[in-house]
Amino acid sequence: MKTLLEAIRPTTFLEPLKLREHMGIDLTIATETFQHTGSFKFRAAYNAALNAPGDHMITASSGNFGQALALACRMLGKRCHVVMPDTSAQVKIDSVRGFGAEVILIDTKTVGREERLDQLMEEFPEAYRASPYDDDFVIDGNSSLGDEITAFAEFDVIVAPVGGGGMISGISKALCRAGHKTELCGAEPLLGNDAARSLAAGRLIRNEQEPMSLADGARTISVGNRNWEIIKDGVSKIYEVTEDGIRNALFAYFLEVNLKVEPTGALSLGAVMENRADFEGKKVCCIVSGGNVDAKVYGEIIGAGS
């Protein structure tokens, strides 16, 4: 049985000359596209599966956490159920099944993820219900990415994608541990701007329904309760990225960095591109959360930008 640090792949740091010169910003990319299962979620999932009691894990996920937990459970000899919206990218559904988990597809317009999880917990009361973000094991697993970033360099600003808040709350914990005074910012879709509205209001605000943004990993009702307690004190600003901004960032990664990125992973660069004046003269780290984009969706985006 491997420890978390033994199981994960270190993140990849890129200092893309062409993109830096084009934007006029001292920019570093920390990409988790080469992490096991193609996203940072493996850090969280493995840590949860490693530390949670029992031998059965249940979760709901649009894809990245689901496939990460499926692989982690396979590595650790645990059973795994994953509830997924039927709008999830097919590549992610196939991957979850490929790693040995049992997939339950739902129409989120008729049944919520949490409602379906409640039903599963009644059927399997001994199982551990793992949230993709609102879970202490998950946050601690994600903090390992923050540890790597702080060890690489001391940045003026780190920008992280925000869906449920698991990544950014983990990064915040790591910054506190390291004693860094780095400004931590989030980036979320304008269509699902609950985190930005929450930070502005000083209280947790929820979306009325799952936002249908191109960034499918950020289609959350709200950030988690545990995540919010960290975000409200540790995050200075959350940028709201337009759908065009997401597309432009994806195309910039493809054309200028030679990197395939999923829409949620492009949020951080999208925030910098749409708010360039906020980052000029600063040493900036943009986190790419993953690269698991549906081939058809990716082809349409890149084709439209060419």
Image: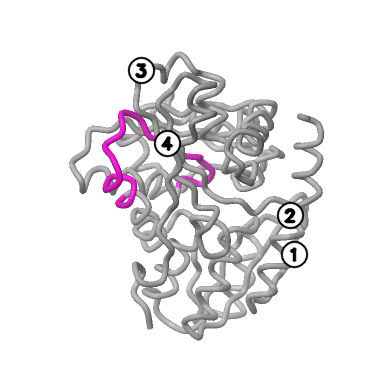
**Sequence-earlier tag: 4 or 1:** 4
Is 183 drawn above or below residue 86 in the view shown? above
Q: In which quadrant is the N terminus drawn?
A: bottom left
Give percent across and percent down for residue 14: 45, 42
Q: Are marks 4 and 2 in contact (CB under 8 Å)?
A: no
Mark 3 neighbour class, 10 Å CA radius: few under 14, some 14 to 19, many 20 or more: few
Residue 156 is inside the magenta segment: yes
Mark 1 neighbour class, 10 Å CA radius: few under 14, some 14 to 19, many 20 or more: some
Query: Where does label 2 land, which residue?
Result: 89
Which residue is rendered at x = 56% and y = 51% of the image? Answer: 290
Query: Where does label 1 land, which residue?
Result: 105
Q: In which quadrant is the C terminus drawn?
A: top right
Query: Where does label 4 land, which residue?
Result: 28
Give percent across and percent down for residue 120: 62, 73
Q: What's the distance in space between the residues labelled 4 and 1, CA to CA?
A: 37 Å
Q: Nearer the viewer, mark 1 or mark 2?
A: 2
**Sequence-earlier tag: 3 or 4:** 4
Amino acid of disc 2: Ala
Residue 243: give its label: none
Residue 281: give its label: 3
Q: Which residues are magenta?
A: 147-165
Which residue is rendered at x = 38% and y = 60% of the image? Answer: 141
Give percent across and percent down for residue 171: 35, 46
Q: Are marks 4 and 1 in contact (CB under 8 Å)?
A: no
The front one of 54 and 50 is: 50
Q: Residue furthest left?
A: 179
Which residue is rendered at x = 75% and y = 44% of the image? Answer: 298
Judged left or right of residue 235, residue 264 is right
Q: What's the distance in space between the residues labelled 4 and 2, CA to CA?
A: 28 Å
The front one of 50 and 36 is: 36
The front one of 35 and 57 is: 35
Q: Where is residue 153, by image quadrant?
A: top left
